[in-house]
Amino acid sequence: MVAILAVGTSRQEPSGGGEVAVPSLRRMLQFPNVETVAAAIGSLALMGPAAAAAVPDIDAGAAKFPRQLQLECASALSSITGDPARGLPVLVQSLENSDPLGRKAAAEKIAVLASLSHAAIPGLLRCATDPDETVRAAAVLTLGRIQAPHDQVVPHIAARLSDPADEVRYAAAVALSGYGAYARPALTHLRACIRDRVEKVAKCAAAAVEKIEAGEL
Protein backbone atom coordinates (compact mmCIF):
# COMPACT_ATOMS: atom_id res chain seq x y z
CA MET A 1 0.00 0.00 0.00
CA VAL A 2 2.87 2.36 0.76
CA ALA A 3 4.25 1.88 -2.74
CA ILE A 4 0.88 2.68 -4.28
CA LEU A 5 0.53 5.85 -2.28
CA ALA A 6 4.06 6.89 -3.18
CA VAL A 7 3.21 6.63 -6.87
CA GLY A 8 0.20 8.89 -6.45
CA THR A 9 2.07 11.46 -4.39
CA SER A 10 5.04 11.69 -6.71
CA ARG A 11 2.83 12.60 -9.65
CA GLN A 12 1.98 15.94 -8.08
CA GLU A 13 5.54 17.16 -8.66
CA PRO A 14 6.28 19.55 -11.53
CA SER A 15 8.08 16.83 -13.53
CA GLY A 16 4.73 15.92 -15.12
CA GLY A 17 3.68 12.59 -16.62
CA GLY A 18 1.24 11.70 -13.88
CA GLU A 19 -0.96 9.95 -16.41
CA VAL A 20 1.64 7.17 -16.71
CA ALA A 21 0.60 5.61 -13.39
CA VAL A 22 -3.14 5.89 -14.03
CA PRO A 23 -3.65 2.63 -16.01
CA SER A 24 -2.01 0.53 -13.25
CA LEU A 25 -4.04 2.23 -10.55
CA ARG A 26 -7.23 1.77 -12.55
CA ARG A 27 -6.55 -1.97 -12.73
CA MET A 28 -6.03 -2.02 -8.96
CA LEU A 29 -9.61 -0.76 -8.53
CA GLN A 30 -10.70 -4.25 -9.60
CA PHE A 31 -8.73 -6.01 -6.85
CA PRO A 32 -10.71 -7.85 -4.15
CA ASN A 33 -8.66 -6.43 -1.26
CA VAL A 34 -10.36 -3.37 0.24
CA GLU A 35 -7.12 -1.83 1.51
CA THR A 36 -5.50 -2.10 -1.91
CA VAL A 37 -8.48 -0.49 -3.61
CA ALA A 38 -8.58 2.29 -1.00
CA ALA A 39 -4.87 2.98 -1.54
CA ALA A 40 -5.34 3.10 -5.32
CA ILE A 41 -8.25 5.53 -5.01
CA GLY A 42 -6.21 7.67 -2.62
CA SER A 43 -3.30 7.76 -5.04
CA LEU A 44 -5.55 8.80 -7.90
CA ALA A 45 -7.04 11.53 -5.73
CA LEU A 46 -3.56 12.88 -4.97
CA MET A 47 -2.84 13.18 -8.69
CA GLY A 48 -5.73 15.59 -9.16
CA PRO A 49 -6.60 16.40 -12.79
CA ALA A 50 -3.83 14.09 -14.06
CA ALA A 51 -6.05 11.17 -13.01
CA ALA A 52 -9.05 12.32 -15.06
CA ALA A 53 -9.05 9.11 -17.11
CA ALA A 54 -9.92 7.17 -13.94
CA VAL A 55 -13.09 9.16 -13.20
CA PRO A 56 -15.43 6.65 -14.97
CA ASP A 57 -13.90 3.76 -12.98
CA ILE A 58 -14.28 5.62 -9.70
CA ASP A 59 -17.84 6.58 -10.62
CA ALA A 60 -18.64 2.92 -11.28
CA GLY A 61 -17.00 1.84 -8.04
CA ALA A 62 -18.93 4.39 -6.02
CA ALA A 63 -22.13 2.55 -6.94
CA LYS A 64 -20.96 -0.91 -5.88
CA PHE A 65 -18.12 -0.62 -3.37
CA PRO A 66 -18.60 -1.05 0.42
CA ARG A 67 -19.45 2.14 2.31
CA GLN A 68 -15.84 2.73 3.34
CA LEU A 69 -14.75 2.82 -0.30
CA GLN A 70 -17.72 4.90 -1.36
CA LEU A 71 -16.40 7.70 0.87
CA GLU A 72 -12.95 7.28 -0.71
CA CYS A 73 -14.57 7.56 -4.15
CA ALA A 74 -16.54 10.66 -3.23
CA SER A 75 -13.45 12.44 -1.97
CA ALA A 76 -11.42 11.38 -5.01
CA LEU A 77 -14.05 12.53 -7.50
CA SER A 78 -14.09 16.02 -6.02
CA SER A 79 -10.28 16.15 -5.81
CA ILE A 80 -9.71 14.97 -9.39
CA THR A 81 -12.42 17.04 -11.06
CA GLY A 82 -12.14 20.11 -8.83
CA ASP A 83 -15.93 20.00 -8.60
CA PRO A 84 -17.24 19.57 -5.04
CA ALA A 85 -20.64 18.56 -6.41
CA ARG A 86 -19.12 15.30 -7.68
CA GLY A 87 -18.50 13.87 -4.21
CA LEU A 88 -19.21 16.29 -1.40
CA PRO A 89 -22.98 15.54 -1.13
CA VAL A 90 -22.18 11.90 -0.31
CA LEU A 91 -19.70 12.96 2.36
CA VAL A 92 -22.11 15.48 3.89
CA GLN A 93 -24.85 12.85 3.99
CA SER A 94 -22.44 10.49 5.75
CA LEU A 95 -22.02 13.01 8.57
CA GLU A 96 -25.48 11.79 9.59
CA ASN A 97 -24.46 8.11 9.57
CA SER A 98 -25.83 6.14 12.53
CA ASP A 99 -22.35 4.68 13.09
CA PRO A 100 -19.91 7.13 14.72
CA LEU A 101 -17.07 5.54 12.76
CA GLY A 102 -18.90 6.50 9.57
CA ARG A 103 -19.41 10.08 10.76
CA LYS A 104 -15.75 10.37 11.75
CA ALA A 105 -14.58 8.95 8.41
CA ALA A 106 -16.79 11.40 6.51
CA ALA A 107 -15.36 14.36 8.43
CA GLU A 108 -11.82 13.19 7.73
CA LYS A 109 -12.52 12.81 4.01
CA ILE A 110 -14.06 16.27 3.87
CA ALA A 111 -10.84 17.67 5.35
CA VAL A 112 -8.92 16.43 2.29
CA LEU A 113 -11.02 18.65 0.01
CA ALA A 114 -9.91 21.85 1.78
CA SER A 115 -11.75 24.96 0.56
CA LEU A 116 -13.79 22.91 -1.94
CA SER A 117 -15.82 21.61 0.99
CA HIS A 118 -17.24 24.77 2.59
CA ALA A 119 -20.77 23.58 1.84
CA ALA A 120 -20.17 20.96 4.55
CA ILE A 121 -19.67 23.54 7.31
CA PRO A 122 -23.21 23.27 8.79
CA GLY A 123 -22.89 19.49 9.02
CA LEU A 124 -19.44 19.74 10.57
CA LEU A 125 -20.69 22.21 13.16
CA ARG A 126 -23.37 19.70 14.14
CA CYS A 127 -20.73 17.00 14.41
CA ALA A 128 -18.65 19.28 16.64
CA THR A 129 -21.28 18.60 19.33
CA ASP A 130 -21.71 14.91 18.46
CA PRO A 131 -22.26 12.46 21.36
CA ASP A 132 -19.11 10.60 20.25
CA GLU A 133 -15.85 12.31 21.20
CA THR A 134 -13.92 10.98 18.20
CA VAL A 135 -16.49 12.51 15.87
CA ARG A 136 -16.31 15.84 17.73
CA ALA A 137 -12.51 15.88 17.47
CA ALA A 138 -12.54 15.01 13.75
CA ALA A 139 -15.15 17.66 12.99
CA VAL A 140 -13.27 20.39 14.86
CA LEU A 141 -9.99 19.56 13.15
CA THR A 142 -11.71 19.50 9.77
CA LEU A 143 -13.25 22.92 10.30
CA GLY A 144 -9.73 24.25 10.76
CA ARG A 145 -8.21 22.31 7.88
CA ILE A 146 -10.77 23.45 5.32
CA GLN A 147 -10.20 27.06 6.38
CA ALA A 148 -13.83 27.58 7.26
CA PRO A 149 -14.58 31.33 7.55
CA HIS A 150 -13.48 32.42 11.01
CA ASP A 151 -16.58 34.49 11.70
CA GLN A 152 -18.73 31.39 11.19
CA VAL A 153 -16.79 28.85 13.21
CA VAL A 154 -14.35 30.33 15.75
CA PRO A 155 -16.97 30.70 18.53
CA HIS A 156 -18.11 27.11 17.99
CA ILE A 157 -14.55 25.77 18.06
CA ALA A 158 -13.74 27.86 21.16
CA ALA A 159 -16.68 26.23 22.95
CA ARG A 160 -14.96 22.85 22.52
CA LEU A 161 -12.01 24.03 24.62
CA SER A 162 -14.11 23.10 27.64
CA ASP A 163 -15.06 19.70 26.22
CA PRO A 164 -14.76 16.80 28.70
CA ALA A 165 -12.68 14.81 26.19
CA ASP A 166 -8.95 15.58 26.10
CA GLU A 167 -8.63 14.95 22.35
CA VAL A 168 -11.49 17.32 21.56
CA ARG A 169 -9.91 20.12 23.60
CA TYR A 170 -6.62 19.47 21.84
CA ALA A 171 -8.31 19.50 18.42
CA ALA A 172 -9.93 22.83 19.28
CA ALA A 173 -6.61 24.34 20.36
CA VAL A 174 -4.94 23.11 17.16
CA ALA A 175 -7.72 24.50 14.96
CA LEU A 176 -7.74 27.88 16.69
CA SER A 177 -3.97 28.14 16.47
CA GLY A 178 -4.31 27.82 12.70
CA TYR A 179 -6.58 30.88 12.62
CA GLY A 180 -4.00 33.09 14.30
CA ALA A 181 -5.26 36.62 14.92
CA TYR A 182 -8.65 35.69 13.48
CA ALA A 183 -9.21 33.58 16.60
CA ARG A 184 -9.05 36.61 18.89
CA PRO A 185 -12.67 36.04 20.10
CA ALA A 186 -11.42 32.76 21.58
CA LEU A 187 -8.65 34.32 23.69
CA THR A 188 -10.48 34.01 27.00
CA HIS A 189 -11.10 30.31 26.44
CA LEU A 190 -7.54 29.72 25.24
CA ARG A 191 -6.00 31.47 28.23
CA ALA A 192 -8.04 29.25 30.52
CA CYS A 193 -6.78 26.23 28.60
CA ILE A 194 -3.16 27.11 29.32
CA ARG A 195 -3.83 25.56 32.75
CA ASP A 196 -5.28 22.37 31.21
CA ARG A 197 -4.33 19.16 33.02
CA VAL A 198 -3.23 17.64 29.69
CA GLU A 199 0.19 18.95 28.71
CA LYS A 200 -0.30 18.93 24.95
CA VAL A 201 -3.56 20.85 25.26
CA ALA A 202 -1.95 23.45 27.51
CA LYS A 203 1.06 23.88 25.22
CA CYS A 204 -1.06 24.20 22.09
CA ALA A 205 -3.35 26.73 23.78
CA ALA A 206 -0.31 28.76 24.90
CA ALA A 207 1.06 28.74 21.34
CA ALA A 208 -2.30 29.88 19.98
CA VAL A 209 -2.47 32.74 22.49
CA GLU A 210 1.04 33.82 21.48
CA LYS A 211 0.12 33.86 17.78
CA ILE A 212 -3.09 35.79 18.39
CA GLU A 213 -1.45 38.40 20.61
CA ALA A 214 1.35 38.83 18.04
CA GLY A 215 -1.24 39.45 15.36
CA GLU A 216 -0.05 36.52 13.25
CA LEU A 217 -2.32 35.19 10.52
Image: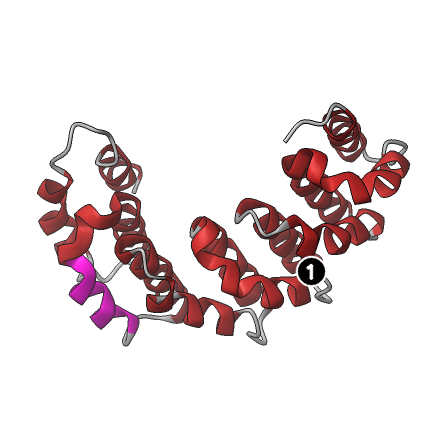
60 part of magenta stretch: yes
Q: Is residue 77 above or below residue 169?
A: below
Q: Give the quarter of the figure containing the C terminus.
A: top right
**Relative to the observer, which residue lies in front, 103 or 139?**
139
The residue under the point 58% across, 71% down is 99
Give 63 or 179, whichever is nearer the viewer: 179
Q: Residues within 10 Å of mark 1 (few under 14, many from 20)?
A: many
Residue 43 part of the magenta-drawn span: no
Residue 123, position as x, y percentages in the image: 60, 68
Viewer-nearest residue: 16 or 129: 16
Q: Residue at x 29, y 40 (%)?
A: 5
> Is 118 positioned to the left or the right of 73 in the image?
right
Using the rendered view, name the quadrant where residue 28 is placed.
Answer: bottom left
Q: Is residue 42 above or below residue 2?
A: below
Residue 97, placed above or below residue 169 = below
Residue under pointer 1: 128
The image shows residue 202 at horizontal and vertical percentages of 81, 31
Q: Which residues are magenta?
A: 54-62
The quadrant of the image that shows the N terminus is: top left
Magenta portion: prevailing SS class: helix
x and y percentages locating residue 160 in the rendered image: 78, 52
* 110 sits to left or right of 165: left
Total numbered labels placed on residues in the image: 1
Which of the 4 image quadrants contains residue 198? top right
